[in-house]
Amino acid sequence: MSLRILLVRHGLSSFNLEHRIQGRDDLSSLTEEGVKQALATGEALRDLSINAAYSSPLRRAHDTATALLAAQGGGLEASLDDDLREVDLAPWSGLLSSEVQERFPEAYRVWKQQPEQLQLERADGSSYAPIPELMEQARRFADRLLERHNPASVAAQTVLVVGHNAILRCLLLTLLGLPASGFRRLRLDNASLSVLNLSATGDRDVVVQIESLNGTTHLHPEVCGGWLPAKGAGPRLLLVRHGETDWNRQGRFQGQIDIPLNDNGFAQAAAAGIYLRKLSFQRAYTSSMSRPRQTAEGILSHHPGVPLTSVRDLVEIGHGQWEGCLESEIEDGWADLLAAWKQAPETVQMPEGETIHDVWDRSLRGWNTIAASLHSDETALVVAHDAVNKTILCGLLGLSAADIWAVKQGNGGVTVIDYPNGADQPPVVVCLNQTAHLGGVL
């Protein structure tokens, strides 16, 4: 049994367009473009059966949910929930961002750099902390959601949640068990789609997996070559998992045995190449194994002249005696160790292989070296493997080695990481595991 949660930020609003602070005041409304975005999101979800929908009561979110569900065609109406309201920035509401920056320079700096530490003053003179309050609000909503749709006690369900930028970020942090300090590590664009899978397994109540984050390709189906959120200041890295191999398809543990792409894997690499062909890469890096190199070469066929460098630190986890084996074969010889790998991977030493901590140390070392080498205006491609990508992303999100199953990496999936303040400062996960170029938004 499982629960799939679809998180959608409201479409472009009048205040978004004007660069005004919205907060939880109901002063802005969807623009014409915002309505189109909501309809496009609903159309992208048309083939999906949605069991329940929840929305913030603020107009820009409620109108997004209404238009989305009408286009989706399932006949649902969204239940309004006050705990999906946006962050309370009352003293700033309605002001241009530039006006807030000019009138409240220190508070604005804190909001941009350490928002969990921001303190504002209410009309009655009392002080409050917007983000900690919002985290508690997200916790209340998450608790009610799991009470109604607990994957341990109900059949598989899909639930839609339509809200705002800050509350959805706090909801993501809450479900992942992350602190408010991770707020600026996430990005959610207007009408973006993020997907979480929740399951009840083993001795844990609920296990959360990010299937994808901040998908926006469905908003631009007419753009040949795909669509990614716009790049701002600082370097950008695109992290891609290699295409499919025969051993992926068969369910074998391949690890450091150098298995090449199969025909579908080459097709996935070609699709990723078309998806990314309008980007400008200055550099490219790959694991020294053939399957990521072949994937990188497929992508770079649209970018002649971009140097491709092999990085030993990015090779896949060494499974030792498990390499080449099916899961059923591993269970016959190492049943307890396999069960531990599924439930507590940080505790497992692969027989004659590596631990996830070994992979964590070298993959993040390789990633950080690449990031530090980039100039502020550069974009680099990095192609690696499932476990390598998962450890990198757990590290960037603030998760631990125990959380590698919390991040999904599909063959040919694309993830975007920005460093808006330089490679020595916390990154932003712009989008994660985008696979629309391989067919469908999920």
Image (spheres, grey):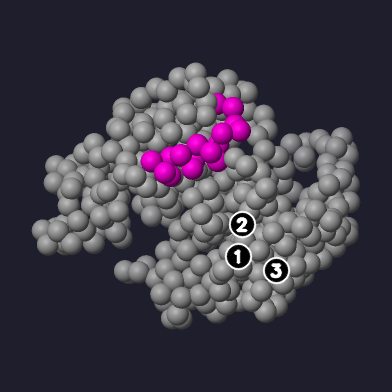
State whether residue 52 is above or below residue 105.
below
Give the position of the N terminus as an image quadrant.
bottom left
- The amino acid pointed to by label 3 is Ala
Q: Nearer the viewer, residue 78 or 135?
A: 78
For discs 2 and 1, the disc positioned in front in the rendered view: 1
* Disc on res. 71: 3
- The amino acid pointed to by label 1 is Leu
Residue 206 percent coordinates (x, y): 43, 68
Q: Which residues are magenta?
A: 266-281
Q: Tell me how far mark 2 sits from mark 1, CA to CA.
A: 10 Å
Q: Main secondary structure of the magenta part?
A: helix
For discs 3 and 2, the disc positioned in front in the rendered view: 3
Say whether residue 7 is magenta: no
* Disc on res. 45: 1
Q: Residue furthest left?
A: 333
Query: Which of the two labelled residues, at mark 2 and mark 1, occupies the earlier sequence position?
Result: 1
For label 1, the SS is: loop
Query: Which of the two labelled residues, at mark 1 and mark 3, occupies the earlier sequence position?
Result: 1
